[in-house]
Image (tube, grey):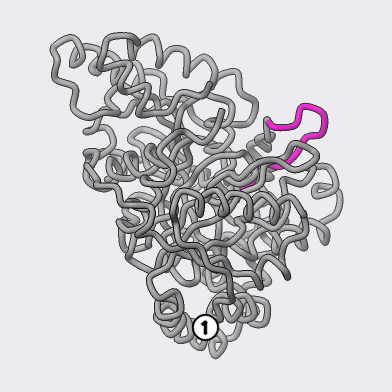
Amino acid sequence: MVTSALALGQAIAEGLIDPRELTQTALSAANGADNVFITLLKERAEAEAHAAALRQKAGCLVSPLDGVPFAWKDLVDIKGTVTTAGSGLLARHRTPAMADAPLVNRSAMAGLVSIGKVNLTELAFSALGLNPTYGTPINPADARTPRVSGGSSSGSAVAVAKGIVPAAMGSDTGGSLRVPAAFNGLVSYRPSCARHDGVGITPLGKSFDVPGVLATSVADCFAIDDCMRVGQVQTRQTLQPSSIRLLVDEAVLDEYVTDPAVRRNLLTSVEQLAEQGVAVSYGRVPAVGQVIDLIAKYGWLGGAEGWVEYRWLVEADTAGEMDQRVKQRLLAASQMSGEKVISLYRQRVALIQAVEQELEGALLVLPTVGHVAPPIAPLEADPAYFADINLKTLRLTMVGSFLDMPTLALPTGLNSERQFTSLQISAPQGDDERLAASALTLFSEPMVE
């Protein structure tokens, strides 16, 4: 049975678990996990766990997560460490951070124990999680065939899936939280962009980047998001299931799902929600199809922003040291004309408004990814195949990013190869609290066992 972050926090509060022992267990597991952690924060973690133990003894824990181990995607500044962004080349241009990023500082205020900084796709620019510099974190779901963990928050997902930490910070530009959640059977929460600032976080596409959480439960995702934003866990009221409406986009299920289990498990999960009293309808959401068509025709705006951010790195004499798959994606994004980019920004504004009107108060349901985690070997062997699978993997998550929809990715089951399937539930831009209340009503228990 998987123990959630909030359950661990409760056990610490009741004196059933010593946060110092919990931290030592996490550090030991992290040290033995191939390619998952880039930097371990042993001294810091031990000090934070000791402080949590003293607070527990005095009866003055600062939050329901005080003393709980946590991991950070290595896009985030933590005092005294170099923020690599998964890039050895970029890391050589940097010095250790002088201070924690604000979201790290706020999480420490809530008592979360920072175990270390985890691996990711170079510059956070791929959905599959391969990293030739720091190694590729392997999906733990299949011991026979090495499969991708999903990216770019690959290390975050594997750290949670392997039980090293109960939850981890990731980030999402076009799907980098939701894809690894889908491939590892986890829950993730992609907030609306305005919910967080990006101070102290290495960017890819600033108009799309947002930090978020990978965990085993919906409650953990929102509680830790609270810690990162305000330094404390918020109390939320749940809803009556009958007040919640879901709209499943049937066109997406018909056109973009290649694994039958993805469709089958999504529909079964939705039917189970209907049995709880949730109002479920099926139809077509025009804005969704329009976004998919726009990206296919013109390209991904997050990539265009990434080119502006990292052109200097791609054009450097040392660019041969980059992951060439990432380099090629950036070069491809450089071909987007100014006219196309401006048109896409304008259409983004219009479509964000359109999708809210089209949903008419319902939450949107889509598959997270139309297929399960693919094996690693063919992707490493064939750059063209990698590029094709990477775009297919991102196709449905980029919809929510383009429309800035707060989104939960939730596991729905397994396929015939015992690989995880997943769905997304999304609200219109800025409607994070309605999404939270709805999800906490419907998914009150940890979803991974």
**Vertical comparison of 442 with 112: above or below:** below
Question: What residue is drawn where x is 40% and y is 49%?
Answer: 439
Question: Percent position (x, y) of residue 323?
Answer: 69, 51
Question: Percent position (x, y) of residue 53?
Answer: 25, 12
Question: What residue is drawn where x is 32% and y is 58%?
Answer: 434
Q: Nearer the viewer, residue 287 or 413?
A: 413
The answer to which image quadrant residue 317 occupies is bottom right
Type of amino acid under label 1:
Leu
Per the picture, the main secondary structure of the magenta-coloured stretch is loop
Q: Nearer the viewer, residue 373 or 302?
A: 373
Residue linked to disc 1: 344
Q: Is residue 145 magenta?
A: yes
* Range of residues picked out in magenta: 141-151
Question: Percent position (x, y) of residue 370?
Answer: 70, 58
Which image quarter is the C terminus in? Answer: top right
Along the horizontal axis of the image, is 121 left or right of 274? right
Question: Percent position (x, y) of residue 191?
Answer: 39, 56
SS under mark 1: helix
